[in-house]
Each structure stands twice: as structure tokens, then as C-alpha cells.
Amino acid sequence: MIIIGEKLNGSIPSVAKAIAEKDADLIRERARMQAESGATFLDVCASVEEDVEVETLKWMIDLVQEVTDTPICVDSPSAKSCVAAIPFCKRPGLINSVSLEGDKIDTIFPVIADTDWECVALLCDNDGIPDSVERRMKIFFGIMEKAKQYGIAPSRLHINPLVVTLGTDQTALTVFADCCRRIKYEYPEIHITSGLSNISFGLPVRKNINQAFMVLAMNAGMDSAIVDPTNKNMIGMIYATNALLERDEYCLEYIGKFGNKAAEEAAQPAPASPLDEKMQKVFKLTQDGKNKEIGQAVQEALDNSF
């Protein structure tokens, strides 16, 4: 599973504050934590006005590269800003993103054509997000024609079918999953990606919806995701799902990720049971010579044993 770390995005209030105050330590720490948690790419999104976006991206990318060599995912709604940020990166990474909206593809694809850079492609156009699988697939084939034109292999693309909010559209998951299956049928080597937060917007306990979406989307063919790599529950779900879907031979990746944790947990002393605690109380009272209280403590221990 390709993990695109999401925690360096200026739309996050704490990151926006760090950008405004030039808090380099916060940017470096978030980069370090995500890299150490196993992120494949680190998404860097400034979310500032376009006239200062490129210089802000440079500041952030430089800080990230001080603490890790994990490839950068350059993230901006501006194709020009994405292209401008490419030289700041020490190694090829991921561009987020293109679509059939405006001239985004014709701005980015020629620049990355003869490189090892990969690219996220959204299934939308100038009319927004299509409401049907058929219209999204039409956009998909349009993107693939452009990729062929510029010599970009399918394996370098991360297609985002775009999931909508479940609370307002009951077909949010089924439409997304159908797109995934059709895309993988046409191009088995292509990647499919998504963020998770859109589907649960407005619903209580959003993590429940997000985790279920992740599992079902992976089952439909999604193999790349924009997530928090420090979220242990979500990462555990990803590794477990990969193993169950026969994408992890002999569960070696799962064991590699969690084998040490299992050993550490096994080495921890088991928590004392209520009966153990009662008997410890009896022992302590005996040591202290508090004979009047021993009888009651023994009775409480006996009551707790049934």
C-alpha cells in the first residue's frame, strides 16, 4: 500500500499557524514522525495565496528534506505552482494533481514526461465531479489519452475517482468502488488513490466511516491513500486488509510491521486481576498486624473468586 502522508497541509489549523509564524520546528517534526511511521510520500501543501505559494512550498520542502529523504508529494490546485516546486525536490516524487480541468494536464505532463515523477489524476473536468460511473470513466479515458500522448506510463499515475460525502449521497462508496474495479480492469498496473475525510463529512465518529471506507476501497482495488501514517488504528487496518486480500505473501509485511509490537506486548506483565488485588490487600494487612481488618479482607477476596 502506498501511503501519502497528509499532515503537512496548510488547511490544518496548526500547520497554517506554523506557516504564518515560520515555525520550522513543527514542520520538521511532522515530517520526521510521518517518515518514521512508514510514509511512502510526504504530501506538502501550503494552502496560501498563489502569489506566495511557491516560496512557501520551497520553505516547507527544504525543511522536510532536512530531516528525511522520503519523496515529496507536491500538492497544489495550481498547476504552475506544482511545476515551479519540482526543482526544490532532491529526488522525484509525486504531483498532486492534474485533471481535465483547464490546462492542468498540458502544464504538468510535458514537464514530468521524461522523468521518474509520478502524478495524481482526479476524475473531474470543467463541469466538476461527475455524478455517474460512466461520466467519470469518460474522463479517465481522456486522461489516459493525454498520458499516452506525453509518454507517461500508467504505473506512474495515481487515479483518484473522487469520493463524495456519504451523508448526502448514499452511493458514495459504491460509485467509487465501481470506478476502481473498471480502472483496474483496463490498466492493472495503474494506481488508485483517495483521501478519506470527504466520505465521512458531517457524520458522527467519522473514524468509523473512514476505516470502513478504506477496507472496502482496498477490496475494490485502491492501492494508494492520502492518510495520517501515525494513525496506528488506520495503518493496522491497511496492513491487515492487504494480508486478507492476498497482497501480502505469508503475511510477511504484516509480521514485519507488527511482529515486534506483539513481542513487546507479550513481555509486559499482565494487569492485576481484582482477585490478585484483594489478596495483596490481605497480605499487606497481615504484614502490618492489622488483625481486625484481615477477616473482612479475606471475605472480600473469597467473594471476588466466584
Image (cartoon, helix red, strand yellow):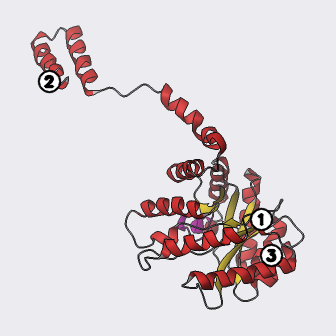
Provide residue 53's location: percent of width, then percent of height.
71, 76
Question: Going from the N terminus, do you reach mark 1 or mark 3 first?
Answer: 3
Q: Which mark is residue 293?
A: none
- Label 1 sits on a secondary structure element that is helix
Closest to the observer, 210 or 243:
243
Q: Which mark is residue 155?
A: 1
Closest to the observer, 182 or 21:
182
- Label 2 sits on a secondary structure element that is helix
- Label 3 sits on a secondary structure element that is helix
Q: Quarter-wise, where is residue 137 in the image?
A: bottom right
Q: Quarter-wise, where is residue 227 in the image?
A: bottom right
Please report the residue visible at 57 percent of the width from the left and 53 percent of the height from the top.
Answer: 238
Dot 2 surroundings within 10 Å: few (below 14), some, or many (20 or more)?
few
Above/below status of 59 relative to 169: above
Question: Residue 252, can we see it?
Answer: no
Amino acid marked by disc 1: Ser
Screen quadrant of the C terminus: top left
Q: Which mark is residue 83?
A: 3
In this picture, residue 85 sits left or right of residue 270: right
Residue under circle 2? 303
Q: Are marks 2 and 1 in contact (CB under 8 Å)?
A: no
Residues under labels 2 and 1: Cα distance?
A: 66 Å
Amino acid marked by disc 2: Asp
Provide residue 26's location: percent of width, then percent of height.
62, 57
Closest to the observer, 287 or 207:
207
Amino acid marked by disc 3: Val
Question: Going from the N terminus, do you reach mark 3 or mark 2 first?
Answer: 3
Magenta span of residues: 5-18
Please report the residue visible at 67 percent of the width from the left and 67 percent of the height from the top.
Answer: 184
Residues under labels 3 and 2: Cα distance?
A: 73 Å
Provide residue 192's location: percent of width, then percent of height.
66, 67
